[in-house]
Image: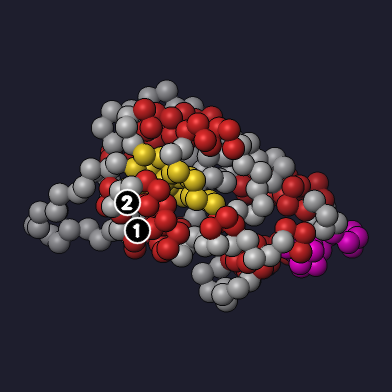
Amino acid sequence: MGRATGDAPPASGAARPAEATIRAAVFDYGGVLTTPVRESIAAWLAADGIRPETFSAALKAWMSRSAPVGTPVHRLETGELAIEEFERLLAAELATHDGSPVVAEGLLTRLFGAMRLDDAMIELVRELRDRGLRTVLLSNSWGNTYPRALIAEIFDGVVISGEVGLRKPDPRIYRLALDHAGVAPAEAVFVDDASPNTDAAAAVGMRAIRHTDAATTRARLAELVPGITTADIS
């Protein structure tokens, strides 16, 4: 089996303890079940003529591991800050190449406008569910419009940060996802594209996979779930 993110290797010569059977798979949404968020951001920055370094600076101040508690991103993701107010605050942090003001209205719609579902990942979720695993969506929301009909079809549980008042990497939101799955932490695998989130899942006791692409994630899951193959991934 592959070693989960954050796991320590067994001591030299020591037998590794038997790992629990994986009974549930928990997935992030943006950047995991969709095309990379960075690609949509790049398209938005170019279309709006925004200087990328100003957006990067805002993200670092509001989202880095060292960011203080209660930044605008934190409050947006927990539902404490209205989308319109967040857009106004973010627009004020940005600068354009030509010096014109950044339009705040609809900013997040434009930011996520080029993001599309990743069909290979959707099929992987379906396959896991067909294999008898419980599937749960665990997403930090920036006011995203989720494909609710599809989510209801392929997931047994849904935990969206703005709807529950918690956000990754708070350990409580992982425990809530585990409650939806009805499994112990060691019986669940968590897939996310952000290291702070996979690190937090591993700390709770889940197996964790940092997602980069569908083929790699499928290969990692094939090490954990009998019957999952690595064939036919584009």
Is there a contact, CB below 8 Å, between mark 2 and mark 1? yes
Placement of 163 over or under 215, stated as above or below: below
Q: Residue 60: percent from the left, percent from the top?
A: 62, 67
Residue 24, label in figure: none
Give the residue drawn at x 33%, y 47%: 182
Residue 76 left/right relative to 54: left
* Residue 211 appears anywhere in the view: no
Residue 185 left/right relative to 31: left
Which amino acid lies under the numbered mark 2 shown in the image of this protein?
Arg
Q: Residue 233: percent from the left, percent from the top?
A: 44, 27
Q: Is residue 125 magenta?
A: no
Q: Does the magenta stretch include residue 95?
A: yes
Instruction: Name the residue tied to disc 1.
Output: 202
SS type, badge 2? strand
Give the residue drawn at x 88%, y 61%: 101
Residue 207, label in figure: 2
Which amino acid lies under the numbered mark 1 shown in the image of this protein?
Ala
* Residue 23 appears anywhere in the view: yes
Q: Residue furthest top?
A: 232
Q: Which of 229 and 77 is in front in this view?
A: 77
**Among numbered discs 2 and 1, the one appearing first in the sequence:** 1
Residue 134 left/right relative to 142: left
SS type, badge 1? helix
Q: Which of 77 and 224 is in front in this view?
A: 77
Where are the magenta residues, as a range?
Answer: 86-102
